Amino acid sequence: MTTQQARLSDFLPYVLSVTSNAVSDRIADEYRARFGLKIPEWRVMAVLGDAGAMTQRALAGATRMDKVAVNRACKVLEDRGLAARSPNDRDGRSHHLELTAAGRAMHGEIMPIALAMERRLFAALEAQERALFKTLLDRLQQAASNMEKDA
């Protein structure tokens, strides 16, 4: 098949994106219905739940979302009392965002739901296939990061 004859459905980045969105949407349906969170808000909460306090710039990098989406998600989380800002002692131009007690409690409720959904989704793969899939995804992510550094 020549480049001009290539089909979008055969273009691996497209397939990865569509698959990622399908998986993310299935999980998002659960936490949207139960907790009123959209995908960007949950991504920010999930990263903060894992890593602790971070700047919005660091959150944009960790979530791979643009600054505007991160800013909006942070604002919603703050307005709902799920996250709070604190001064960044290293850089007076930025703040750290961290989960509040209510945010940590909600994170603690959502994670088991997300993990259960992950188990259901990946039940289609055997244990060794899941391990290989994770390894391959890690390698692709590293390759993309290396390309980004070279650009």
Image (spheres, rainbow, N blue to C red):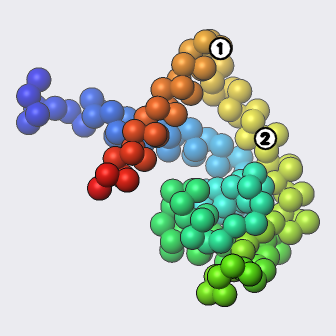
Q: Quadrant of residue 104?
A: bottom right
Residue 37 as seen in the image, left or right of residue 137? right
Note whether 141 is above or below 75 in the view shown. Answer: above
- Between 85 and 14, the one lying in front of the other is 85
Task: Tell me the kind of residue under disc 2.
Answer: Ile
When asked about the image quadrant of residue 56, the answer is bottom right
Picture coordinates of residue 5, whole percent (x, y)? 10, 31
Which residue is located at x 51 percent, y 71 percent? 67
In the picture of the structure, the residue carrying the numbered disc 1 is 127
Give the quadrant of the N terminus.
top left
Q: Nearer the viewer, residue 56 or 108?
A: 56
Residue 107 at x, y percent in the picture: 81, 54
Q: Which residue is mark 2?
A: 113
Q: Earlier in the sequence, mark 2 or mark 1?
A: 2
Tell me: residue 71, above or below residue 105.
below
Distance (Cα) linking label 2 and label 1: 20 Å
Q: Is residue 42 visible?
A: no
- Foreground pick, 45 / 38: 45
User: Residue 148 vs residue 100: left or right?
Assistant: left
Q: Secondary structure at mark 1?
A: helix
Which quadrant of the structure image shows residue 96? bottom right
Q: Residue 138: x and y, percent?
A: 52, 34
